[in-house]
């Protein structure tokens, strides 16, 4: 019995050590943490595309914008809410192409600190679920399009990705 408990304890320790390995990328004053085995493509000055090479519907588009702190401080709550909603809409328009068939989407919901929407359907023939989120942290605005093959994968992806203002 002791041997069985020891073997199970060793197996549990080994499994916990095999957690998802992560990598970090610094971009416009922000550090982005993502799965180390994913491919990162820095498309332009504000846009990153990070994708699981094994499951193509698992991906994250990240847009990062440095904001003027004085202008940001002078912006009303209503204007910030509208700005964040427009970021979500813009990300949707830039990402959802003719290769997507949307079967479900929510309206864009938002406050002066965050805006988001959810959608699902097929992309390039594969099923997907996605969440588009926009928020401002200090003077950096983030917008992410998190796509996954199902809700379980989306939750896992969202728990791995971290965004930190440096």
Image: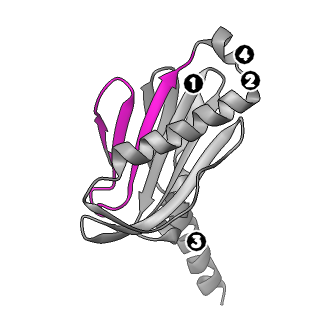
In the image, 98 versus 54, the foreground residue is: 98
- Relative image position of residue 24 (x, y in whole percent): 45, 35
Are the residues at dot 1 and dot 3 in contact (C-beta closer than 8 Å)? no
Residue 49 badge: none
Secondary structure of the residue carrying numbered label 3: helix
Tell me the crowding category of disc 4: few under 14, some 14 to 19, or many 20 or more residues within 10 angstroms, Cα based.
few
Residue 140 badge: 1
Question: In which quadrant of the rendered view does residue 54 lie?
Answer: bottom left
> Residue at point 52% right, 47% down?
161
Are the residues at dot 1 and dot 4 in contact (C-beta closer than 8 Å)? no
Horizontal side of residue 100 vs 83, given as left or right: left
Residues rendered magenta in the picture: 40-67
Q: Is residue 101 above or below residue 78?
A: below
The residue to which callout 2 is attached is: 76
Of tags 1 and 4, which is closer to the observer?
A: 4
Identify the mark nearer the N-term, 1 or 3: 3
Gap between marks 1 and 3, in whole Å?
Answer: 40 Å
> Residue at point 52% right, 26% down?
30
Identify the mark nearer the N-term, 2 or 3: 3
Tell me the crowding category of disc 3: few under 14, some 14 to 19, or many 20 or more residues within 10 angstroms, Cα based.
few
Secondary structure of the residue carrying numbered label 1: strand
Residue 73 badge: 4
The residue to which callout 3 is attached is: 12
């Amino acid at each position: 019995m002791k041997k069985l408990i020891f073997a199970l304890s060793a197996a549990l320790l080994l499994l916990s050590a095999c957690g998802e390995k992560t990598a970090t990328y610094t971009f416009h004053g922000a550090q982005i943490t993502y799965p180390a085995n994913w491919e990162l493509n820095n498309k332009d000055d504000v846009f990153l595309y990070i994708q699981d090479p094994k499951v193509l519907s698992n991906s994250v588009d990240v847009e990062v914008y440095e904001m003027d702190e004085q202008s940001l401080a002078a912006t009303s709550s209503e204007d910030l809410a509208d700005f964040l909603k427009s970021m979500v809409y813009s990300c949707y328009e830039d990402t959802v192409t003719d290769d997507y068939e949307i079967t479900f989407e929510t309206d864009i919901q938002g406050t002066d600190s965050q805006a988001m929407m959810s959608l699902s359907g097929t992309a390039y023939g594969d099923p997907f679920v996605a969440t588009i989120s926009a928020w401002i942290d200090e003077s950096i605005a983030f917008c992410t399009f998190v796509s996954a093959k199902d809700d379980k994968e989306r939750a896992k992806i969202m728990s791995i990705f971290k965004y930190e203002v440096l």
